Image (spheres, rainbow, N blue to C red):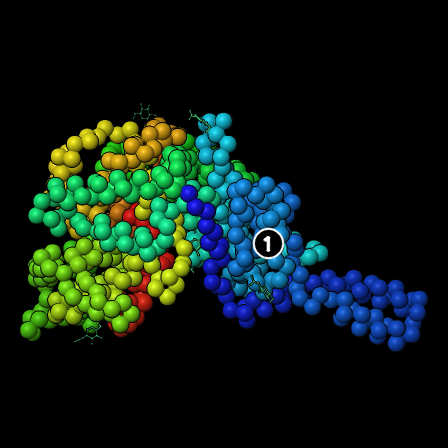
Amino acid sequence: MQAKHGSIMEPKLQTSEEHRRRGNRCWSLCKLVGFVFLLNFFLYFLHLDPRPTTVISWLHGDVSLEPKQPRFEQLPRPGDPFQFIPCTADTKLPDLHDKNHKRTWANLFDPNWENYSWGIHDSSRPQGIFLCGYIDVPFDYKNKSEERTFRLAVTKYQVSGLKCRGETVSSAAGEKSKRTIILEPGGPGGSGTFSAWKTAVNVTQRYSDGQFDVLGWDPRGVNLTLPQWSCFPSNSHQDRWRLLVDRLPEMNDSPRTQLEEADAMNDANFRACKERAGDIPQFVSTALVVRDLDQIREALGEDELTAYVVSYGTTVGQTYANMFPGKVGRMVLDGVCDAMEDRKFSGFATSALGNITDAWHDGVLGECVAAGPSRCELAKPIKGEVVTVSDLEKRMDNLLASLKKRPMAAYLPSDGPSLVTYTDIMRSIFTSLYNPTRWPALAAALADLEQGNTTLAAQLVALSWTFDPENPSKPSVPDYHNLMAMVVCSDGYDAPRSSNLDWWVDEWEAMYAQEKIGSSQNFYYSFVCQNFLKYWPNVAEVYRGTFNNSLKNPVLLVSQTHDPATPLHNAKRLHSEMGKNARLVIHHGYGHSSVDRSDCTDAIARNVILKGVFPTDLETECYANSKPYSEDAKKEDLVEAWRENIQSSGVGIR
Ligand SMILES: *[C@@H]1O[C@H](CO)[C@@H](O)[C@H](O)[C@H]1NC(C)=O
Ligand SMILES: *[C@@H]1O[C@H](CO)[C@@H](O)[C@H](O)[C@H]1NC(C)=O
Ligand SMILES: *[C@@H]1O[C@H](CO)[C@@H](O)[C@H](O)[C@H]1NC(C)=O
Ligand SMILES: *[C@@H]1O[C@H](CO)[C@@H](O)[C@H](O)[C@H]1NC(C)=O
Ligand SMILES: *[C@@H]1O[C@H](CO)[C@@H](O)[C@H](O)[C@H]1NC(C)=O
Ligand SMILES: *[C@@H]1O[C@H](CO)[C@@H](O)[C@H](O)[C@H]1NC(C)=O
Ligand SMILES: CC(=O)N[C@H]1CO[C@H](CO)[C@@H](O)[C@@H]1O
C-alpha cells in the first residue's frame, strides 16, 4: 500500500482582478467599521483637545491603523467537524498516522487571501469561496474492534464567502447556508472534490439561485481520500498494462481463447491490488459509502439530506434513501441506476445494452445526417450523393470490420509511431455516447479514417493515456478502474455465479448478439468479479433491503431516453418499486445524465432543491434545449473540446 498526496487545489478559478474586487469589499467594510470607531474617538477628542493638528494626526493614525490587506477570519473555526480552511495550493490532508492531525491541518491556514480560490463575483451577494476540510469515518461501522479509519477529503463552495476580522455589519458572511447541496459524481471512482471544483459555482446557480453551499467528497478509495493506494507503481505501468489487456473478445477468432487470457490477467491484476492495498477493498461497498454520506450530513448539522447525485451516485442516493428514509430531504438523482441490478452477477453490465445502439444509431449517426455536412463531417456527400442514415450505418460497419482485420498506421509528432485499432475506436465511440459535445470530433475522426487519414483519430485516442511524457515522474493516481471493480464486485459479491469459463463465454455471446458497440466493454466490467472473492472474501457490509420504504420526502429521478449507461427502463423499474416516494422526469435528450441541457428539467430540479416543491405528476416529460452538432467547429477546436470533456467528466462507466 502506498500513501501519496495529491494537491487539493485546482487551478485558480478567478483572475487577480476579481480577487482584488472581493478584497476591496472586505477592505472597505473593515474601513467602515474602523471609521465609525474612530469617529467616536474623534468627537471625544474634540471635547478634550480641540487643537486641529492633533485631530489631523489622529486622522492620519486612522489610515495607518487600517489593515493594509483585507483580513479575513482565522480558520478553522473551533469545533468545526470538517476543520474547514480556505483551499490553497498547499492544502494537503494530514497523514492518517499523524496524532496531531488537527494541529497540522490548522497550521496550513494561510492568512494571505490572495492565495484563496474565490467563486464568481456577483455584486448582489457576497463572493463565494472554496473551503477544504476532511472528516474521519470508520472502516467498518458494525465492527467495533476494527479501529482503522478513512480520512475523507471534502471540498465545500461556501456561497457567503468569508467573514472579515471583527466584522459585525454583514453577519451572514462566512456562515454556512441553510442547506448544503452534496454532490456524488458517480463512477464508482468519481472524485467529489474534483466535481465541486469543476461544477459547484454552476450547481448552486442552477439549482438554488446561488443560495446553497455545495459540497463534494472523495469516497473511500477515491482520489485524495486516505488511505490512498494504486495497484500500479506509476502511470506508465498502468498504461502498459492496459495495452496488454485492451483486446475485446470479438477480436479473437475464438472468444474463449480471449476470455482465458483476460481471466488470467484479471487474476494478476487483483493479486497486485491485494499486495498493494491489503484488505481495504473489503470496505468500499455502496452501503459503507452511504453511511459516510450520512456522517457528512450529520456533521453539517442538517436534519435532512440535500443532494444532487449522478450516475453511480444515484445508486448511493437510492440506497441512502432506503437506509435512512427519515433523513431524505431534497434529493435529485440524475442518470438513474437500478441498484437491484447490481445484486445480479452481470447486472451492472447488461441493463444498458438496448439503448447503446439507439444512442449510436439515432444520435451520433442520425443527428449527424439531420445536422448536415456543414456541421458533421460524416454527412458530406459522397460522389455527389446525399448521405442517408442507413448508408452511413453501412459505411461505419465496413470501417469497423476493416479495423478489426487490421489496425491503421498513424504518426503523431508528439508520440512517434501510432496505431489506430478496432478497440481504440470502439472505446472512443462508446465513451462519446456519454456526451454529445464530443460527437463533432468523433464524426470528423471517423470520416478521416474512411479516407485513410489517421491523424485526428490517433490524436483523440492518445488523450486516453494517463502517462504524461512531459511529466514522466508524475506519480500514480488511485486507479479508478480497479476501485470501480472493487465496488461493483462487493455489491454483487453473493450473486449466484459459475466459475466455469464456458458459462462466461455464453454470457458474452448473448450480450454481443444483442449489441455490438458497448457489450464487450461492459462485459469486462462484470467479468473481473470472477476473481474478486479469491482475494477479498469478507465484504464488510451490503444493503439487501428493498427500495420501497416510506420516505420523509420523495426523491426526484431524472432519466434520459438515449442514455448509453443508465437507460430509462432502470429508472422506470426503480420508480415502480418506489411508487409515490419518487417522481420521474423523462428527459428526452442524448448523453449520460442530463448533460444535454433542458430548461424544463432544470426548473423542476431547482424547485425541488431550492423550495422543496415536487412535481404533482408521477411522471413529467422534458426535452433538451438543442440538438447535437448545433455549432460549427474547426478541427483543432474539436481535439480541444474532446480533451476538455475527458477532463471535466473525470471518470466513469456510469
Ligand atoms: C501565498 O502568497 C504569498 C504572497 O503573495 C506567496 O509568497 C506564497 O507563495 C503564496 N502561497 C501559495 C501556496 O500560493
Ligand atoms: C472485526 O475487526 C477485527 C480487527 O480488524 C477483525 O480481527 C475481526 O475479524 C473483525 N470481525 C468481523 C466480524 O469482521
Ligand atoms: C483529485 O482532486 C483534485 C481536486 O480536488 C483534482 O485536481 C484532481 O484532478 C483529482 N484527481 C482525480 C484523479 O480525480
Ligand atoms: C452551467 O453550465 C452550463 C453548461 O456547462 C451552462 O449552459 C449554464 O448556463 C450554466 N449555468 C449557470 C447558472 O451558470
Ligand atoms: C489528415 O488530417 C490532419 C488533421 O485532421 C490534417 O492536418 C492533414 O492535412 C490531413 N492529411 C492529409 C494528407 O490530408
Ligand atoms: C416492499 O416490497 C416488498 C416486496 O418486494 C413487500 O413485501 C413489502 O411489504 C413492501 N414494503 C412496503 C413498505 O411497501
Ligand atoms: C429511446 C429508446 O429507443 N429506448 C430503448 C431503450 O431500450 C429499451 C429496451 O431495453 C427499449 O424499450 C427502449 O425503446
Q: Name the residue carrying label 1.
A: 108
Residue 620 position within the rendered picture, expressed as x and y whole percent measured from the top left: 31, 46
Residue 226 position within the rendered picture, expressed as x and y whole percent measured from the top left: 47, 44
- Image quadrant for the N terminus? top left
Considering only vertical position in the picture, is 410 above or below 280?
below
* Left or right of 558 in this view: 56: right
Farthest-out residue, right: 48
Q: Quadrant of ligand 2?
A: top left
Considering only vertical position in the picture, is 245 above or below 40?
above
Viewer-proximal residue among 528 and 361: 528
User: Is the CB of the residue bearing disc 1 within 8 angstroms of ligand 1?
Assistant: no
Looking at the rendering, which quadrant does residue 580 occupy?
Answer: top left
* Left or right of 518 in this view: 195: right
Residue shown at 71% from the left, 65% from the top? 67
Check disc 1: other Cα within 10 Å, few if <14, some if 14-19, many if 20+: some
Residue shown at 52% from the left, 49% from the top? 93
Residue 269 position within the rendered picture, expressed as x and y whole percent measured from the top left: 29, 43
Residue shown at 86% from the left, 66% from the top? 43
Residue shown at 13% from the left, 34% from the top? 502
Viewer-proximal residue among 458 and 295: 458
